[in-house]
Image (tube, rainbow, N blue to C red):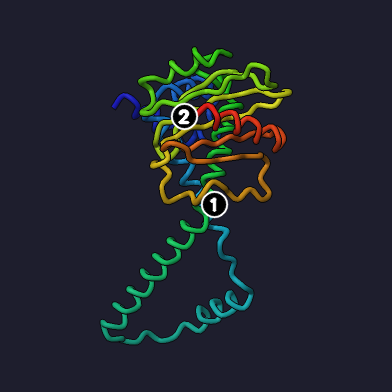
């Protein structure tokens, strides 16, 4: 495949360990290649899931002591019936399945927030945050036609404090979406639009847990689309822009 040579360095790129000149080249390729963009996002999500899962359980001192004692005793090997090993294997598999289900269910909504925040930060940190640069919504909206499998409307910003900087394609759960960037009083705000069905099962209602998060955000579902408005602007500004987007949709 054409992108195989790129994907062999994808983990190094995501860990920011490539030389600076290669980072710029790789950044441009990932933003223009749907396959590598989806693969990069999948790997970021996997790393985040592993980090979250690793923090779910901390063993107690008593548990560690018991494990150390059991290892030190080194009991003699005994011949146990085959059914004992089979029952143990079934129990281990059952516990593993239940644990994984619990982690996925509990962290699903929080993980969506983290992924959206990662997309927001990564885009603003990029040397080219937008693919179509324009303050005119009538220029930005048509640019997405044929690039994403849905249409959406942009709000009229006249007589408001907001300005449109441009837009770019983005991916969440390997699903393409639109990413618009707005400006208000030197604060950048991202507006993400995805098909709602692509996030089925991961979101419940129109709210996300935002405790100890560095950004304000609003999210809602409207006419089959899922919207996210996120940024370090005030909650009032986020709410105001979200209201305008809702009205336009």
- Name the mark on residue 21: none
Picture residue at 65% right of the left edge, 36% below the top: 239
Q: Residue 83, relative to residue 93: is it above or below?
A: below
Q: Residue 50, relative to residue 163: is it above or below?
A: below
Asked if residue 136 lies left or right of residue 96, the reply is right
List x then y, in percent, for residue 205.
51, 49
Picture residue at 68% right of the left edge, 21% below the top: 160
Which one is in front, 249 or 95?
249
Image quadrant holding the N terminus, namely top left
Q: Quadrant of residue 20?
A: top right
Q: Residues within 10 Å of mark 1 (few under 14, many from 20)?
A: few
- Name the mark on residue 170: 2
List x then y, in percent, for residue 31.
46, 24
Question: Separation of disc 2 and disc 1 at Cα?
Answer: 23 Å
Q: Residue 233, relative to residue 154: is it above or below?
A: below
Q: Is residue 53 visible?
A: yes
Residue highlighted by disc 1: 51
Picture residue at 57% right of the left edge, 48% below the top: 208
Which one is in front, 225 or 97?
225
């Amino acid at each position: 495949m054409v992108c195989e040579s790129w994907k062999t360095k994808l983990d190094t790129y995501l860990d920011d360990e490539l030389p600076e000149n290669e980072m710029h080249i790789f950044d441009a390729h990932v933003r223009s290649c749907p396959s590598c963009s989806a693969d990069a996002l999948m790997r970021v999500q996997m790393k985040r899931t592993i980090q979250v899962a690793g923090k779910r359980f901390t063993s107690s001192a008593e548990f560690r002591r018991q494990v150390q004692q059991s290892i030190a005793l080194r009991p003699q090997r005994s011949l146990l019936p085959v059914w004992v090993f089979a029952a143990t294997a079934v129990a281990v598999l059952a516990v593993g399945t239940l644990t994984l289900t619990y982690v996925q269910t509990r962290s699903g909504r929080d993980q969506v927030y983290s992924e959206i925040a990662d997309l927001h930060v990564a885009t603003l940190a990029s040397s080219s945050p937008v693919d179509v640069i324009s303050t005119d919504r009538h220029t930005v909206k048509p640019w997405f036609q044929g690039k994403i499998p849905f249409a959406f409307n942009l709000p009229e910003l006249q007589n408001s404090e907001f300005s449109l900087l441009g837009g770019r394609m983005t991916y969440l759960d390997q699903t393409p979406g639109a990413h618009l960037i707005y400006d208000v009083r030197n604060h950048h705000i991202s507006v993400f639009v995805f098909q709602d069905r692509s996030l089925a099962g991961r979101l419940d209602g129109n709210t996300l847990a935002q405790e100890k998060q560095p950004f304000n955000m609003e999210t809602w579902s409207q006419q089959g689309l899922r919207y996210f408005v996120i940024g370090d602007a005030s909650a009032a500004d986020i709410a105001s822009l979200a209201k305008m987007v809702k009205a336009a949709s």
